[in-house]
Image (cartoon, helix red, strand yellow):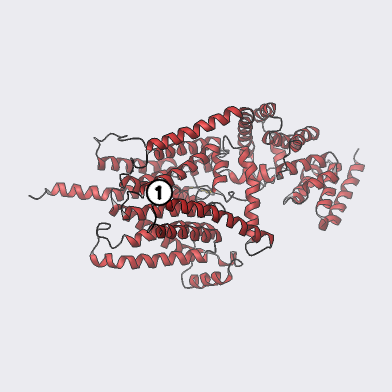
């Protein structure tokens, strides 16, 4: 007996709904992408309005699975809890940020990533997930074409000239697009994370159970996907993104080894092999990096820059370790409070972990690391009972995640850019396979909860033992957040007269921030964050002895970071101890430029000619190449000081 036509149409509609749900998530993400976030901020549109598309997505999903089914049917999964708390941490980041527009723009990108995760996880079967992978495969090809259409090849000719020439010749065959170009390092990272998806696209294409397609197309599809993978690989090569190359090589090498070992060993043995090789590979990589730096081999300059950026970013991360500086706030916080300059220098630290720590504090970083560990744990355990199709999907997701994490140590492709929308895609692929394999019981959720309880218990013990310095840093982080919200909200480079932060600090109310810093100092006299911020404020106020008291305490506590050295140099110059100041700041990147700025803007413009002379003499000692000009400036300032009444 045939089914009624209405039943068949409803069945077809339910089969299409998962794709509609994915479309809702992608459209919401596209709208939020147009608004900006992370790097740039476009406008107030669409704001929360696009969240209606995610609500529609959930409505379709509930209708498809049945409204009678309990909303929280089954056990609450740890990954859902972690994602919810990560979203909450991002929401807190909108309140700690000094600029609400960019912070909310980045928050909606996080929401978009969250929606895309569930749109993938809720795909009902392998055929539907293959459709999701197809979107990912087409995205990689489209991104490669976009790169060839828009890239400015003259911007990076020195990395690998042969590949740049190849890319330039390909671009010459295509029409030039007026769309803005994206940094090749970002494109390279995106292509690298996409490459693993082509393996299941090829492997699953010919199987009847995978994709409901005509036989001839199913036979042709693997060759089409191999061609697409070749296009993406070509795009990855010509981006000359060496970090993405390295991450891709490591990821696929370990994947091939995992598959090769599977013919002889169990998953547990394979996992031990992979873990051991990762440790060995890390040690070998450290040795290679050492020789690259020691003998100035190709790539030494880029590696040095990344290491220096990481070194300079860690003090900022510590400043905001408990509160976070807020979403989308890295650039100006880094310039003003770490480099101690007054113009935006770099948009992120190029390290995903440091960026998370800066903007969302230790909570955001721990939640992300927990997601990574849980994804790997559940993915590997599910391979024991997964079908061969599910195994390919799990492995592709894990390799994509590995590529993101390895490349993320030198380039923050996702969290530090508007491509944050793709942040949870590898997690979604692994989780889909875990749920599809019915491996929730196999993954031992109770054990996962016990591990979580154990980690929380350990953190509680550490908090009890080190409560005093931790509480002090908590006050210091709150003070730093409050200071940034007051000062940077008022900040306008090029419009604020004089030495910019001096002018701002002489007008705004910093009592609340300073009170928090003082509480931190009371609990821990050597707290670097509180002392450095107080020293900077008192220098701007012209209270040089007080500034010296604070930064001297940090120096006495053993801190030798660039922020401490620059502030100590400022205080020593203000007190006329020029030789000591030059010895402290010698070798620092911004030492000369900052001291020249202080001589002109902090002292000369305020008619403090004696200190202007001190600053110019410090410049002469720090940078002998400019000594003659600096000494002339110093003598001119000294003449003005003598002529003062």
Give x and y (percent) for residue 315. 65, 42
Residue at the image point whose x is 81% and y is 44% from the top: 581
Q: Along the horizontal axis of the image, is 248 left or right of 548?
A: left
| Residue 257 placement, left or right of 601 | left
Along the line of sight, the residue nearer the viewer: 280 or 477: 280
**Residue 128 percent coordinates (x, y):** 29, 52
Q: Mark 1, residues whose alpha carbon is within 10 Å: few (<14), some, or many (≥20)?
A: many
Residue 187 in sight in this render: no
Where does the C terminus fall, quadrant-wise?
top right
Looking at the image, which residue is at 45% across and 63% down? 144
**Which residue is painted at 48% across and 66% down in the image?**
148
Q: How many numbered tags mark residues here?
A: 1
The residue to which callout 1 is attached is 380
Give the image location of residue 331, x and y in percent.
60, 46
The residue shown at (25%, 68%) is 216
Q: Is residue 99 above or below residue 522?
A: below
Give whichever of 78, 629 is nearer the camera. 78
């Amino acid at each position: 007996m045939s089914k009624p036509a209405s039943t068949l149409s409803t069945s077809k509609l339910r089969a299409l709904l998962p794709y509609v749900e994915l479309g809702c998530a992608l459209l919401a993400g596209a709208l939020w992408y147009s608004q900006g976030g992370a790097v740039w901020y476009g406008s107030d549109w669409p704001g929360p309005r696009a969240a209606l598309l995610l609500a529609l997505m959930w409505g379709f999903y509930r209708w498809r699975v049945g409204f009678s089914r309990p909303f929280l049917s089954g056990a609450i999964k740890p990954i859902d809890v972690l994602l919810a708390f990560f979203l909450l941490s991002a929401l807190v980041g909108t309140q700690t940020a000094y600029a609400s527009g960019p912070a909310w723009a980045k928050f909606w990108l996080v929401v978009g990533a969250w929606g895309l995760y569930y749109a993938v996880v809720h795909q009902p079967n392998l055929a539907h997930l293959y459709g999701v992978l197809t979107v990912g495969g087409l995205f990689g090809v489209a991104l490669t074409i976009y790169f060839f259409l828009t890239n400015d090849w003259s911007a990076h000719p020195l990395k690998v000239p042969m590949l740049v020439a190849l890319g330039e010749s390909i671009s010459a065959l295509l029409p030039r697009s007026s769309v803005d170009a994206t940094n090749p390092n970002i494109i390279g990272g995106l292509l690298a994370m996409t490459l693993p998806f082509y393996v299941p696209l090829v492997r699953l294409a010919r199987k009847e159970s995978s994709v409901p397609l005509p036989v001839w197309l199913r036979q042709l599809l693997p060759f089409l996907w191999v061609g697409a993978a070749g296009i993406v690989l070509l795009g990855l090569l010509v981006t000359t993104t060496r970090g993405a190359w390295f991450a891709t090589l490591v990821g696929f090498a370990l994947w091939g080894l995992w598959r090769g070992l599977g013919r002889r060993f169990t998953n547990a043995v394979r996992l031990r092999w992979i873990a051991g090789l990762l440790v060995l590979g890390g040690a070998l990589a450290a040795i290679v990096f050492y020789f690259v730096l020691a003998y100035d081999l190709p790539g030494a300059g880029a590696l040095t820059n990344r290491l220096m950026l990481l070194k300079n970013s860690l003090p900022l991360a510590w400043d905001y370790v408990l509160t976070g500086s807020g979403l989308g706030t890295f650039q100006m916080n880094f310039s003003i409070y770490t480099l101690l300059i007054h113009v935006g220098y770099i948009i992120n630290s190029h390290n995903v972990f440091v960026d998370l720590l800066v903007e969302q504090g230790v909570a955001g970083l721990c939640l992300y690391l927990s997601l990574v560990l849980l994804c790997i744990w559940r993915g590997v355990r599910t391979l024991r009972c997964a079908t061969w199709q599910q195994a390919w999907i799990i492995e592709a997701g894990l390799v994509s995640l590995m590529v993101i994490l390895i490349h993320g140590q030198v380039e923050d492709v996702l969290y530090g850019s508007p491509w944050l929308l793709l942040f949870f895609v590898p997690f979604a692929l692994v989780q889909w396979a875990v749920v599809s394999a019915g491996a929730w019981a196999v993954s031992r959720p109770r054990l996962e909860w016990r591990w979580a309880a154990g980690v929380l218990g350990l953190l509680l013990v550490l908090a009890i033992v080190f409560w005093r310095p931790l509480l002090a840093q908590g006050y210091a982080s709150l003070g730093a957040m409050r200071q940034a919200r007051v000062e940077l909200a008022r900040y306008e480079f090029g419009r604020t007269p004089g030495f910019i932060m001096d002018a701002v600090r002489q007008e705004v109310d910093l009592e609340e921030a300073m009170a928090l810093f003082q509480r931190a100092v009371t609990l821990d006299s050597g707290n670097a964050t509180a002392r450095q911020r107080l020293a900077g404020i008192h220098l701007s106020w012209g209270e040089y002895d007080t500034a010296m008291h604070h930064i001297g305490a940090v120096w006495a506590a053993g801190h030798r970071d660039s922020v401490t050295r620059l502030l100590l140099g400022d205080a020593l110059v203000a007190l006329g101890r020029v030789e000591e100041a030059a010895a402290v700041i010698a070798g620092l990147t911004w030492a000369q430029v900052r001291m020249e700025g202080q001589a002109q803007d902090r002292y000369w413009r305020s008619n403090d000619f004696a200190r202007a002379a001190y600053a110019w003499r410090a410049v002469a000692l720090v940078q002998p190449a400019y000594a003659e000009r600096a000494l002339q400036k110093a003598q001119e300032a000294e003449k003005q000081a003598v002529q003062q009444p």
